[in-house]
Amino acid sequence: MGRVYNFSAGPAVLPEEVLRQAAAEMLDYDGTGMSVMEMSHRSKPFAGIIETAEADLRELLQIPENYQVLFLQGGATQQFAAIPMNLMRNKVADYIVSGSWSKKAFKEAKLYGDARCVASSEDENFSYVPDVDAIEFSPDADYVYICQNETIYGTRYPKLPDTGDVPLVTDVSSMFLSEPMDVSKFGIVYGGVQKNIGPAGVTIVIVRDDLVREDVLPFTPSIMRYTTQVKAKSLSNTPPAYGIYVCGLVFKWLKEQGGLTAMKAKNEEKAAILYDYLDQSALFKATARKSDRSIMNVPFVTGSDELDALFVAEAKSHNIESIKGHRSVGGMRASIYNAMPKAGVEALVAYMAEFEKAHA
Ligand SMILES: *Cc1c(COP(=O)(O)O)cnc(C)c1O
């Protein structure tokens, strides 16, 4: 059986070249006579893997010297707790709630201090991003938190909030490495890799040096302290070694593709094919506000639950997988990450046009 066009939101499609290379190296990594899966995380070959991965990531994102790069476990969700535990010195933090993920992060932070929701778009089912210029941030906040691309509702920030000296923390799980970003604008940039980078199990945290401090909330488990992980270079305990290796292969692949500027152009082109079709369609409609649309996750509906269900059911016969929308939005969602080829988006649009004709 051949490969399908996999529109899953995560775990998600990976570059075929990367999967082939991982397969080729499965039994014998670089003449070691063993798989990366079988290798000590303290061994020389693994040190090479994680150091090269970090160097390539730094190059791709142009990460400044005063930021640490951590490869952790626990998912983005563990960071919902780790961030307040490590950063809440005044025990105050501002959250912009623009979807399920930032809402979950906000709820978690409330366990540890005075987390404040300073803006929300829940009034319109998170179909837009709150106007960041209209927000009054707390002067005593330890940080301001955003989820820059909301995977479920398909929105992304058209503009970042200006938080002055207050560190801005961003969850970029579903847009990680989809385009260049200015890391120096943030205190922390983090995300789970299973959306746009690699296999589930690795969380990348990029944290500015001044936020790696000993004076964390006293009950913070040592494994969740950034100081612990920075000192141990992510090897405080056994890291998600195989996942880090695959991330490293993806970083090399991204460099071969021309880096993040080239990825951005490709991603914008793919997103335009889909949105252009949606905007002229008499049947399908994109659900996110036009100015705030994600170029990674594209939710859309027909307006009829029956037709949505039929579209999802018949997708399989068009080689299209995991196109069903999240239950909180309904309808469909196409996640068109870095590794989704343009041909996949074209195949989706061709199927949509055929479906629209049949059900006009
Ligand atoms: C998937 C997702 C998460 C949760 O990630 P886990 O690794 O499953 O904890 C958090 N934030 C965003 C934006 C996501 O897309």
Image: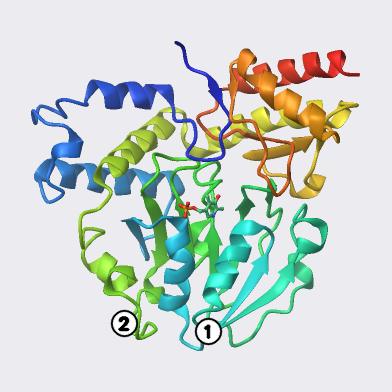
Label 2 CA crowd tier, 10 Å (few <14, some 14–19, many 20+): few
Is 239 on the left-hand or right-hand side of 189? Answer: left
Is 285 on the left-hand or right-hand side of 44? Answer: right
Residue plotted at (59% across, 58% down)? 101
Label 1 CA crowd tier, 10 Å (few <14, some 14–19, many 20+): some
Residue farthest along the front direction in this orientation: 306
Residue plotted at (39% across, 76% down)? 210
Residue 147, visible in the rendered structure:
no
- Mark 1 or 2 closer to N-term? 1
Quarter of the figure that contains the C terminus: top right
Query: Which amino acid type corresponds to the residue marked 1 in the rendered image?
Result: Gly
Query: Which amino acid type corresponds to the residue marked 2 in the rendered image?
Result: Glu
Q: Position of residue 11 (x, y in %)?
A: 47, 39
Residue plotted at (42% across, 22% down)? 16
Number of labels in the image equals: 2
Residue plotted at (31% across, 42% down)? 243
Does the Cβ of the disc 1 residue fall within 8 Å of ligand 1? Answer: no
Q: Position of residue 5 (x, y in %)?
A: 56, 22
Residue 125, visible in the rendered structure:
yes
Q: Is residue 122 above or below residue 158?
A: below
Tell me the SS state at disc 2.
loop
Is 334 on the left-hand or right-hand side of 56? Answer: right
Q: Which mark is residue 302?
A: none
Tell me the SS state at disc 1.
loop
Q: Position of residue 272 (x, y in %)?
A: 72, 30
The residue under label 2 is: 214
The residue under label 1 is: 113
